[in-house]
Image: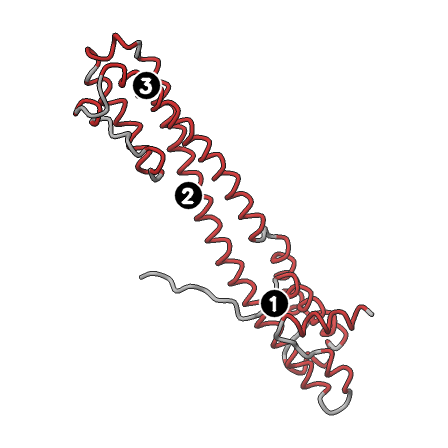
């Protein structure tokens, strides 16, 4: 069964979530004696802190996307090498066969510029196979095993680049989902801490009560963050 997409429970950036969690932890440490009345002790608070540290130290989506873009560029370069090697072979094929003949069309390179990665890889290997099958006709054009070996190596590098890129895409998807899962756990724990804090001070200290309030919108969070810095 396909796993359902994981959605964030919060509407602000991960960096803001981290800072909000750290603020909540700082307040809870101050009020730890009261928190123990809710069976929330220092050990649990330390576990919360450790999860926050692990969360912020992990790669974010910008880093993962950058890695994906790097290997994608390498895949594009490998694809260009395949196209160049194919065209080098086909230049010699045209010296022998008109592009309207069946022998030429067997190579299947007419739309090489519009092919998907899989189609291009398939095309490169087909060109090698068809060229070898028609070797007696093409030898006089200067086509030799070196040209086909160059194309074969280009196809091999391209396939490797395709696999690496697909792995990076999958790694990013997994990492993003994992980060959302962890972020949601931190958010839930922060809400628990803040609910306890508000309950502690609801009737005795308005300022301490307000310090535990969570602002759900990003704009509200920016306003409260600026007020704390001023």
In this rendering, the label closer to the viewer, 1 or 3: 3
Of the numbered discs 1 and 3, the one sitting upstream in the chain is 1
Q: Position of residue 21 (x, y in %)?
A: 66, 68
**Vertical order, 61 against 27 (above or below):** above
Residue 113 position, x and y percent, is: 36, 34
The answer to which of marks 2 and 3 sits earlier in the sequence is 3
Q: Which mark is residue 166?
A: 2
Q: Nearer the viewer, residue 173 or 138?
A: 138
Q: Residues within 10 Å of mark 3 (few under 14, many from 20)?
A: few
Q: Please state which of residues 139 and 47 is positioned toward the viewer in this rendering.
A: 139
Q: Is residue 125 above or below residue 204?
A: above
Which residue is label 3 attached to? 91
Residue 143 in the image: x percent, y percent? Answer: 30, 12
Asked if marks 1 and 3 touch (Cβ < 8 Å), the reply is no
The image's mark for residue 12 is 1
Q: CA distance from mark 2 to mark 3?
A: 32 Å
């Amino acid at each position: 069964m396909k796993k359902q997409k994981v959605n964030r429970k919060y509407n602000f950036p991960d960096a803001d979530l981290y800072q909000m969690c750290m603020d909540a932890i700082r307040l809870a440490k101050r009020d730890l004696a009261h928190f123990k009345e809710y069976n929330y002790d220092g050990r649990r608070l330390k576990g919360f802190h450790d999860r926050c540290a692990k969360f912020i130290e992990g790669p974010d989506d910008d880093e993962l996307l950058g890695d994906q873009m790097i290997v994608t560029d390498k895949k594009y370069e490998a694809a260009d090498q395949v196209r160049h090697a194919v065209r080098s072979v086909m230049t010699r094929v045209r010296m022998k066969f008109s592009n309207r003949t069946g022998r030429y069309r067997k190579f299947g390179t007419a739309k090489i510029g519009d092919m998907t990665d899989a189609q291009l890889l398939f095309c490169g290997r087909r060109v090698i196979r068809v060229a070898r099958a028609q070797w007696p006709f093409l030898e006089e054009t200067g086509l030799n095993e070196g040209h086909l070996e160059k194309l074969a190596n280009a196809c091999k590098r391209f396939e490797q680049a395709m696999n690496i890129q697909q792995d990076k895409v999958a790694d990013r998807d997994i990492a993003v989902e994992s980060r959302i899962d962890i972020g949601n756990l931190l958010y839930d724990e922060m809400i628990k801490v803040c609910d306890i804090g508000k309950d502690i001070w609801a009737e005795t200290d308005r300022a301490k009560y307000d310090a535990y309030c969570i602002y759900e919108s990003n704009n509200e969070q920016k306003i409260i963050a600026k007020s704390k810095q001023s």
